[in-house]
Image: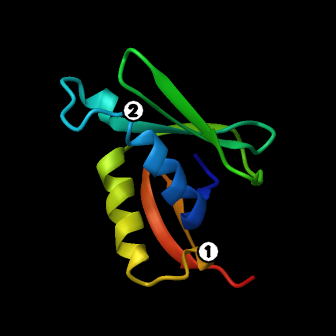
Amino acid sequence: MKTPIPLPIAELKSALTGLSKIIPKRASLPIVSAIKIERTSTGWITLTGCDLDQFATVRLEQPTPGEAAVVLIPLDELLKVSALLNVFGALSQYRIAIHDYRINHVANVKR
């Protein structure tokens, strides 16, 4: 994946609240405890979680430029990052970037 997938923290936090209700706390398969993050060729970003019986998908509000990509990130990693940034407040100013199949950096976005 050449172009990082940016995830606005404010949108990510609300998406994780819903998706964490689907994903089991203790999964027998590691893949079930991950969130699928996908950017389509048109730039729309979706987050999907499942428990093998049901699934939920959240589409973020704004498309982002970049090539199509799909990555799996453990839910607990995303929850840790969003909880850490919650300490700073003003979540709308921050975003994270998924690059090379991991959370690459956190940025303060000037609007």
Relative vertical location of residue 104 with respect to residue 67 in this rendering, above or below: below
Under circle 2, the secondary element is loop
**Alpha carbon separation for disc pair 2 and 1:** 25 Å
Which residue is drawn at the image coordinates 52% and 30% (left, top)? 56
Q: Is residue 72 visible?
A: yes
* Residue bearing mark 1: 92
> Which residue position is annotated with label 2?
22
Question: Residue 47 in the image: x percent, y percent?
Answer: 55, 40
Name the one closer to the observer, 24 or 110.
24
| Image position, residue 102 (x, y; %) | 41, 53
Residue 94 found in image quarter: bottom right
Q: Is residue 48 above or below residue 60?
A: above
Q: Count numbered badges in the picture.
A: 2
User: Which sits earlier in the primary sequence, circle 2 or circle 1?
Assistant: 2
Residue 30 percent location from the top left of the image: 25, 30
Residue drawn at 53 percent across, 49 percent down: 15
The three-letter code of the residue at mark 2 reads Ile
At 64% from the left and 54% from the top, the residue drawn is 3
User: Residue 32: where, in percent of width, then height?
Assistant: 32, 28
Q: Amino acid at mark 1?
A: Ser
Query: Against 66, is 80 above or below?
Result: below
